[in-house]
Image (tube, helix red, strand yellow):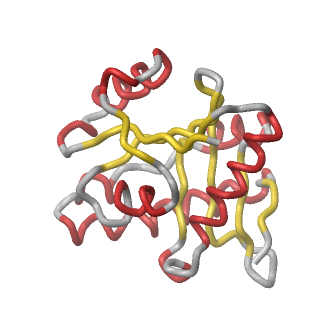
Amino acid sequence: MPIRAVRLSDLTVLQDIERAAGECFRDVGMPEIADDDPLPIDELARYHDAGLAWVMADESDAPVAYLIADRVDGGLHVEQVSVHPDSARRGVGRALLDHLAAHAVGEGARALTLTTFTEVPWNAPYYARCGFRLLDDSALTPGLRRIREREAAHGLNRWPRACMSRVL
């Protein structure tokens, strides 16, 4: 399946993918995550406009997964990567992460970062298999600290959470 830049016409589909991907959090006792609203269209459009949004598309060019990123402290930060459950376990998420890594190298970024739940199998353990390593709090950059503060204000610290980095 090809990876391509997000189109403005894709944005509502990205919300649908995020909703569908979030449903699996119900199975691990995190219904609040499943019930959380996807990013608003105007925020998704900001990632499109910045050139930091990609989809993996099926044979009819319909998105089945997406990744959006921010520039944070000299690296690229994975803000969201979501794969529709119908396309899960096929290397789609890893392909999007690798695509971002190649883009980051082209920009001269030194690392990819992300924040994730540490005890959810398709979160921190998955990202570790994709080359990310956990960062302890002393290694957090100012930008990562601000991201964690925003997440805490949103209630995400209710579950164990951490930052991870993949050196490029």
Q: Nearer the viewer, residue 27 or 106?
A: 106
Q: Nearer the viewer, residue 100 or 35?
A: 100
| 96 lies left or right of 105 | left
| 107 lies left or right of 65 | right
User: Against 156, is 91 above or below?
Assistant: below
Residue 32: where, in percent of width, then height? 25, 52
Quadrant the N terminus occupies: bottom right
Q: Nearer the viewer, residue 52 or 166?
A: 166
Which residue is at 43% across, 27% downward? Answer: 147
Numbered circles on residues, count: 0
Which residue is at 50% across, 20% downward? Answer: 143
Quadrant the C terminus occupies: top right
Which residue is at 23% across, 72% downward? Answer: 27
Residue 70: where, in percent of width, then height? 63, 33
Residue 45: where, in percent of width, then height? 71, 40
Q: Hey, which quadrant is residue 49 in on the image?
A: top right
| 147 lies left or right of 3 | left
| 120 lies left or right of 67 | left
Residue 148: where, in percent of width, then height? 36, 28
Which residue is at 39% across, 21% downward? Answer: 145
